[in-house]
């Protein structure tokens, strides 16, 4: 059975495909959800997440850039960038508890990225959460 984590994975993979130049990634998203057996509320969640990230991408990227320390946005690993975009979107535009957003992003990093990416992503999202949600 598919989980919300699987829904987030599908969104990250679709964003990554777009970043890699796959112009058909959006068209293929529904098929990806079907293949992964992501249905009903989880599919709706994934579609809203993808739509939201794409609609707010410029603002999300600006937030990420503001929270990078001694790192250039353009040098970020492409998959890490997508994980951060999803995390920042959820922190800024949803009411998902910040701990869940960060935990899910770290899980995604564990599944798709290098080992060191987990703490990098955790640190950035923690700083973003403090700013956008007023977390102490």
Image (cartoon, rainbow, N blue to C red):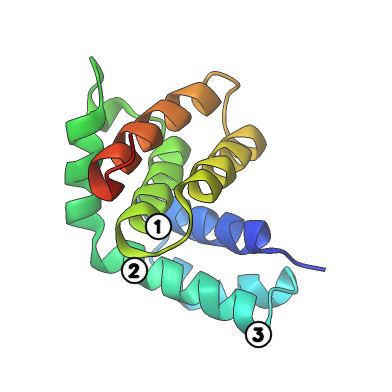
Depicted 7 relative to depicted 107: above or below:
below
> Which residue is tagged 1?
90
Alpha carbon distance from label 3 to label 1: 20 Å
Indicate the quadrant where residue 128 lies.
Answer: top left
From the top left corner, tell me how far across and down residue 71 is, in percent: 26, 19
Give the residue drawn at x 27%, y 44%.
134
In contact (CB < 8 Å): disc 1 and disc 2: no
Depicted 45 relative to depicted 58: above or below:
below
> Which residue is tagged 3?
40
From the top left corner, tell me how far across and down residue 106 is, in percent: 56, 36
SS under mark 3: helix
The tag on residue 39 is none
> Is tag 1's residue or tag 2's residue first in the polypeptide sequence?
2
* Quarter of the figure that contains the C terminus: top left
> Which residue is tagged 2?
52
Q: Nearer the viewer, mark 3 or mark 1?
A: 1
Q: Residue furthest top?
A: 70
SS under mark 1: helix
> Is tag 3's residue or tag 1's residue first in the polypeptide sequence?
3
Indicate the quadrant where residue 89 lies.
Answer: bottom left
Indicate the quadrant where residue 36 lies.
Answer: bottom right
Q: Nearer the viewer, mark 1 or mark 2?
A: 1
Q: Residues within 10 Å of mark 3 (few under 14, many from 20)?
A: few
Give the residue drawn at x 42%, y 59%.
22
Depicted 69 relative to depicted 26: above or below:
above
From the top left corner, tell me how far across and down residue 26 is, in percent: 44, 72
Q: Residues within 10 Å of mark 1 (few under 14, many from 20)?
A: many
Q: Residue furthest front?
A: 136
């Amino acid at each position: 059975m598919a989980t919300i984590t699987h829904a987030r994975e599908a969104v990250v993979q679709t964003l990554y495909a777009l970043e890699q130049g796959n112009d058909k990634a959006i068209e293929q998203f529904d098929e990806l959800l079907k293949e992964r057996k992501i249905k009903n509320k989880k599919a709706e969640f994934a579609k809203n997440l993808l739509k939201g990230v794409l609609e707010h991408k410029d603002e999300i990227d600006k937030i990420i850039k503001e929270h990078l320390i001694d790192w250039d946005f353009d040098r970020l690993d492409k998959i890490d960038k997508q994980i951060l975009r999803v995390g920042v979107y959820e922190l800024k535009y949803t009411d998902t508890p910040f701990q869940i957003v960060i935990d899910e992003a770290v899980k995604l990093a564990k599944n798709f990225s290098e080992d060191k990416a987990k703490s990098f992503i955790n640190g950035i999202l923690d700083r973003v959460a403090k700013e956008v949600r007023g977390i102490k």
